[in-house]
Amino acid sequence: MVESAELVQQNHQVIEDVPAYVRALGKSARAAASSLSIASTAQKSLALNAMADAILKAESVLLAANAQDVATATEKGIDAALLDRLELTSQRIASMAKGLRDVAAQSDPVGALSETNRQPSGLEIARMRVPLGVIGVIYESRPNVTADAAGLCIKSGNVVILRGGSEAVHSNRAIADCVRQGLLAAQLPESAVQLVQTTDRAAVGALLELDEYVDVIIPRGGKGLVQRISEQARVPVIKHLDGICHVFIDEGADRARALAVAVNSKTYRYGICGSMETLLLHEGESRLMLPALMDAFTKLGVELRGCDLCLQIAPDMIAATQTDWETEYLGPILSIRIMADIDAAMAHIAHYGSSHTDAIVTENMARARQFVRQVDSASVLVNAATCFADGAEYGLGAEIGISTNRMHVRGPVGVLGLTCEKYVVTGDYTTRG
């Protein structure tokens, strides 16, 4: 069986037996899991800060590697949203390093005990936070995930196997080298973070079947990728399929500020999963707000598609179809629908939404509370743009993904979301009668 050090040396080689190679990664990961689960907070923080230092020091190397990936992707005609996710800049590299430092500064959940509950039997019952174990992360386009996932997994005491998209292969390898430097600086096993070196798609299938070594899979990518992983994985999957996010502008909302929230929700970055795809407008505001919305979005180059009621106010607007309400555009297209009231808006979200992120803009706190209670999404916002649905913005330092599952974690998944609990029971030579 190929050992971890040899795996790294296969960086630029063709790997003929992909399943055997991936299985070797899993075996190395499982071997590292026990030592990482008991690593001290200081040791893990040292690793993360050393990774951040290495990333900043290697900025020119990272930019050059990323330029190769961007050039190749451009030649292949990759769409604008994916190209935006792929590109690294000095600012994004600095953000990667900051994210690692922010995660390092967070409290360490591993080993934390809940309040003890003493039972009539004399037993003292508590719950302890423990790592999930070995995590497989399969992602497309975003090379920053290499650093984010590595940092979050190390902090939470987990080992991770990373399989990035072929479009970011050079970027991911360069970042993974910085991660390796951080592990070495903290005297943690190199196999605690392993990047799958082959771009062969068979590696994804092999990883999904690795239930002997992998405890959970986290996919980050397009709906097709996530759907395939959900259907084929033999291990639990923390996932979201798409981000069909809504903003509902309620009757009586501050129009100028509501307009600002709507524009920011859509145009902050088109390619993020928290970008608004459908704007729901209370009919009481439609005649005054719709022209202002059209003017603002048209100036920013956003194509608007409206319902029949929208077309009565703005006949030149493109008519929306059923498909528009179901589409995550990830680009400069926005669908608009006029709603009779908050109940109609929530019904639309329940039918067409993806349980990702939805927002209400309102001056009525009773309706805000109703929206928060009834909208079943991983993030529900009041008077704030949907683009805030992000681990860093939620104080998590970074995120390994956004979960729309109803498992142990929903929304942006940070350090705490990468742990679970076990019961710790203490007795006094206690027996059960």
Image (cartoon, rainbow, N blue to C red):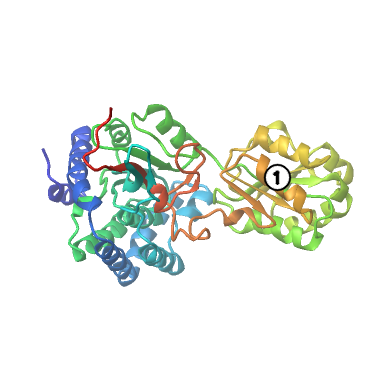
In the depicted view, which residue is nearer to us: 371 or 318? 371
Q: Position of residue 208 (x, y in %)?
A: 32, 33
What residue is shown with label 1?
Answer: 371
Q: Is residue 212 visible?
A: yes
Q: Residue at x 48, y 53 (%)?
A: 83
Left or right, residue 62 beside residue 285? left
Q: Residue at x 67, y 40 (%)?
A: 374
Screen quadrant of the C terminus? top left
Q: Position of residue 288 (x, y in %)?
A: 88, 54
Task: In the rendered view, tell whether residue 233 sits above or below residue 362.
Answer: above
Left or right, residue 337 beside residue 206? right
Q: Residue at x 71, y 36 (%)?
A: 348
Task: In the rendered view, tell whether residue 312 sits above or below residue 360.
Answer: above
Task: In the rendered view, tell whether residue 236 sits above or below residue 132.
Answer: above
Screen quadrant of the N terminus? top left
In the depicted view, which residue is nearer to us: 399 or 343? 343
Question: How many residues crowd around disc 1 within 10 Å: few (fewer than 14), some, or many (20 or more)?
Answer: many
Left or right, residue 402 beside residue 56? right
* Snapshot quadrant of residue 170: bottom left
In the depicted view, which residue is nearer to us: 377 or 161? 377
Q: Position of residue 388 (x, y in %)?
A: 58, 57
Q: Amino acid at mark 1?
A: Phe
For numbered disc 1, what is the local secondary structure?
helix
In the depicted view, which residue is nearer to us: 106 or 302? 106
Q: Is residue 165 visible?
A: no
How many marks overall?
Answer: 1
Q: Position of residue 48 (x, y in %)?
A: 31, 63
